[in-house]
Amino acid sequence: MSIFTLFFCGTGSNRNDSTPNAVIEDKDKNGAWIFHAGELISTLAKNMVAQEFYSWTIVDGPGSGNLQEQEKWVKPGNHHNIMGQLLGKGWENNVAHALAVLKADPSFFAQQPGYIAQKKQFQIRTTNSQPIEVVNLVGWSRGGVTCHMMANAMAEDPKLSHIKVNIFAIDPVPGLFQFAEHRTKIKFNVHDYYVVYARHEASLGFTPVMTNNLDVSGKIAFYAMPGRHATVVGNGSETGDNIYNQPTDFTEPGKIVRCLVEKQLTSWGVKLNNTLSLTDEEMLQYYDIMLADLPKYQLMSKNVYTVRDYFSAERKVGNESQNKKWSQLNMLASPNFSGKDIFINQHHMNLFINYQSRMRLNEADMAKKFPTTCQLITKLPPTFNR
């Protein structure tokens, strides 16, 4: 079975952001993001075992400097950074490029002089002569939304509509007035659908998409994580954005998200180098640290990338016409017992219960390993039955 994986970078981000302490500059706003272990999407792509274009490729995000435009397999858009950052200009062109790569379609450059990079890429792409049966789509921010766009474009293409699609979208934010149907819905070709949402983002224009048609044929999972939009892909700063000379004590969400994506990609048949390979105990320890630091994560919402969204005291999720508050969505709300949030999310709770059962540990042993979680549990009424 032939598998192809597409990585879509977020707004302002590109393939070069995998370097530890990589900085994504936003010169128009005189700001930046830093990723202390490298930004997640570019890091995943860098760690792919196969040669690029044989079974995968990565697409730079809108507003990231047009560094990839001259190597695209379609006529490039060359949009100004501001238009890319504000309106996502360039992401439709990104989808067209990805479709051409997927179909091994050289029609844009094959008969023209030059285009040396594309012609070399085409040679690599056509070395893999097996028909593609599965396409994995992974993206952050507008790159996460581009996963929806790509899947929908494939569903409408007679040459690609039969291919099974798996999606892992990380905080898929389209931006203000960018909630068109082909960005907010998924179609029949999507098999597995996984999505991460950042809980403490308060910036106006950063409402993430939640598709309202989730009748996929495979598995669905939602992961609610503390922190801001960039926290979940590797920004470890205490504000979730700007950067220099700040404590980097908030790396746990990014590590868990990376591990979740790596494990899912592996289950989808992808081969990766340098995976985190966290054990269940290590993940539970990271969750325990997040629980202890929740008040600090809540303070992150005082920082914004644009201006504060004063229309809601908590983050909204959905689309422009049907936004819902975070607390109204059961799949995102923390597991609640007797009015107390004991776990970060459903994944944390399931991992905790299964780990204790599998390892046959008593409460004292669990408390030594995960003190904050167990302390919260001991405060529950005696009638609570774990």
Image (cartoon, helix red, strand yellow):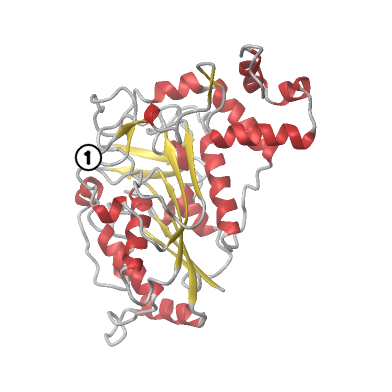
Q: Where's residue 224, x and y in %?
A: 47, 35
Report if residue 234 is visible in the image.
Answer: no
Report if residue 247 is visible in the image.
Answer: yes
- The reply, left or right, for residue 22 in relation to residue 145 is right
Residue 91: image quadrant is bottom left
- The reply, left or right, for residue 132 in relation to residue 342 is left
- Residue at figure coordinates x 36%, y 77% from the top left: 159
- The reply, left or right, for residue 368 in relation to residue 174 is right
Which amino acid lies under the numbered mark 1 shown in the image of this protein? Ser
Q: Secondary structure at mark 1?
A: loop
Q: Which residue is mark 1?
A: 321
The vertical placement of 43 against 125, above or below, is above
The vertical placement of 366 against 71, above or below, is above
Residue 338: image quadrant is top right
Q: Where's residue 102, x and y in %?
A: 40, 72
Residue 15: image quadrant is bottom left
Q: Check the picture and name the quadrant holding the N terminus.
A: bottom right
- Foreground residue among 275 and 179: 179
Q: Check the picture and name the quadrant holding the C terminus.
A: top right
Q: How many circles with numbers are drawn on the protein? A: 1
- Foreground residue among 288 and 320: 320
Category of crowding for the residue at label 1, using alpha-carbon neighbours closer than 10 angstroms: few (below 14), some (14–19), many (at least 20)? few
Q: Where's residue 125, x and y in %?
A: 46, 77
The residue at the far front in this view is: 383
- Residue at figure coordinates x 30%, y 38% from the top left: 207
Q: Where's residue 240, x and y in %?
A: 41, 32
The vertical placement of 219 against 103, above or below, is above
- Foreground residue among 7 and 133: 133
The vertical placement of 180 against 362, above or below, is below
